[in-house]
Amino acid sequence: MSINRREFLKLAGTSTLIGLTGISAVEEILKGNAEASVLPSPAALTAKRWAMVIDINKIGTKEEYEKITQACHSIHNVPDIGNKKDEVKWIWQEDYEHSFPGISDEFVPDHIKHKPFLLLCNHCAKPPCVRVCPTKATFKRPDGIVVMDYHRCIGCRFCMAACPYGARSFNWRDPRPFVKETNPEFPTRTKGVVEKCTFCSERLAKGLKPACVEASNGALIFGDLEDPNSEVRKVLSTKYTLRRKPEIGTGPSVYYVIGGNEHAG
Amino acid sequence: MYNGGKIIVGIAIFVGLFVFPIFYNMGKPSAMPEPKLDTPVINQLDEKRCVESADYMRANHMQLLDEWRDSVLRDGNFVYESSNGKKYVMSLQNTCMHCHSNKKEFCDSCHTYANVKPYCWSCHLESKEKAL
C-alpha cells in the first residue's frame, strides 16, 4: 500500500499532536499528589511603603530611650557584647551633630545639641546596601522594607561599607552567649553574618506594629508613606521634619521631628 | 618465587585485616534510627499528621523547608495551605519545633545516622524544654 506525501504529513501531524497532549495530560494526573499552596498572612499589616516618624521631643528620660531599645533588642535576640568593636545594634543613640552631619550648625539650641537621637535602619527607597550585595542576601521588599536573608549572607560586609548610616552590624563572634534571654519565637544570628533592623517584618505579618513603636508611648509613629491618610503623613504634613543625609539620594524612610509646636527644653 | 612463603603469609594477613570489618559487622546491622514522636504537643493531637503525610515529609522535608524559607522571607507569604486544606504558619521554630520539641530524639536521630549536618540550629533555636 502506497501513501502519498500529503497523507503522510497529515498522519505525522495528528500523531504528534496526540502524543504531546497525551504527555501533558499524564503529567497533570501524576502531579496531583501534594497540591499545596502558600498564602499571605490574613492579619498582616500592609502598605505601599512603610515609614517611621520619630518625634524626639516626646522621648525625654534615659529610661524611655532604654525601654525602646530594649523592646527591640530583646525580642530580636540582639546580643549585648559590651565592646564597641564587636557591638551589634538595631536601634541606638547618637547626638545631633553625628546624626545630621551635613546640616548641623555650631549654634543650635542646647536641648537639640545634646539630645540623643534614636537611629535605626532607614529602609531607603534606593538602598545602597542592596545594590552592592553580591548574593542578594539583602533586598528590598515591595512594601519598602529592606530585609536580610541570613541564609544567603556570606559575610563580605560590602553592605556595611555601602550603608551611609552605619545601620548594619557584623557578627564577629558567635552571638548566642551574649544574648541574655533568648526569645524562643525568633532566631538568633550566627557568626559571620551582617544584621540590622527589619522594621519588625515578622510582627507586621501578625498584624502588630514594630516593637519600638509599641514601646515608645507615641513618640515613634509608623505608617504608610504613600497613603495620604496615614498617621505618618498626617505628622509630616503638620510638622517640619528632617531625614538623615537626604542629599546623597538614598531616600531614607525615617523622619525626625526636632522642633515642635511647643517650646521643648 | 623468592621468599614465596613470607609473601603469601603477608598477603593473607593483609587480606584478613582488610576484610575484617566486613565480617565483624556481618549479621548485626547497626540500629535503624527511630525518630520519636513522643512530645506533649503531639500526644495531644487527635490526628497525628504532620503538615503533609509522613512519607512525604520523610522524603521531602528539606525541600519543603527550603520553599518555606523563600516564601516567607522573599515573598512575605507566611501561611502554608497543605494538600489536605489545613493551614499552617510557615516557621521552623514556631511551627515545626512546636510539635517536635524533642530535637535530639527526632531530628538528630536520623541526621546523625545519615551523617548529614544541617546548620539550621546555628541560628534557629530548638525548643526550650529540651534545651536544658
Image: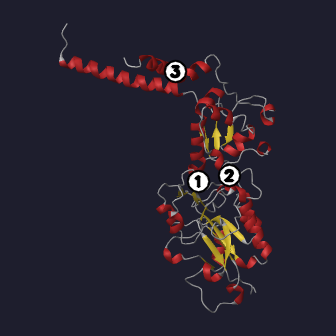
Marks 2 and 1 belong to one chain: yes
**Spatial distance from mark 1 to mark 3, Cα to Cα?**
54 Å
Between residues A105 and A90, which one lies in front from this camera angle?
A: A90
Q: Quadrant of the N terminus of chain A?
A: top left
Between residues A195 and A174, which one lies in front from this camera angle?
A: A174
- Disc 1: CA contacts within 10 A as few (<14), some (14-19) or many (>=20): some
Q: Is residue A112 left or right of residue A172?
A: right
Residue type of the residue flagged with mark 2: Pro
Disc nearest the viewer among 1 and 3 = 3
Could you tell me which secondary element the residue under label 1 belongs to? Answer: loop
Residue type of the residue flagged with mark 1: Tyr
- Residue drawn at 41 percent across, 22 percent down: A22
**Spatial distance from mark 2 to mark 1, Cα to Cα?**
10 Å
Could you tell me which secondary element the residue under label 3 belongs to? Answer: helix
In the picture of the structure, the residue carrying the numbered disc 1 is: A150
Residue A148 on image: x %, y %? 58, 57
Query: Which labelled disc corresponds to residue A187?
Result: 2
Decide which of tag 2 and tag 1 comes sooner along the chain. 1
- Residue drawn at 64 percent across, 35 percent down: B112
In the picture of the structure, the residue carrying the numbered disc 3 is: B13
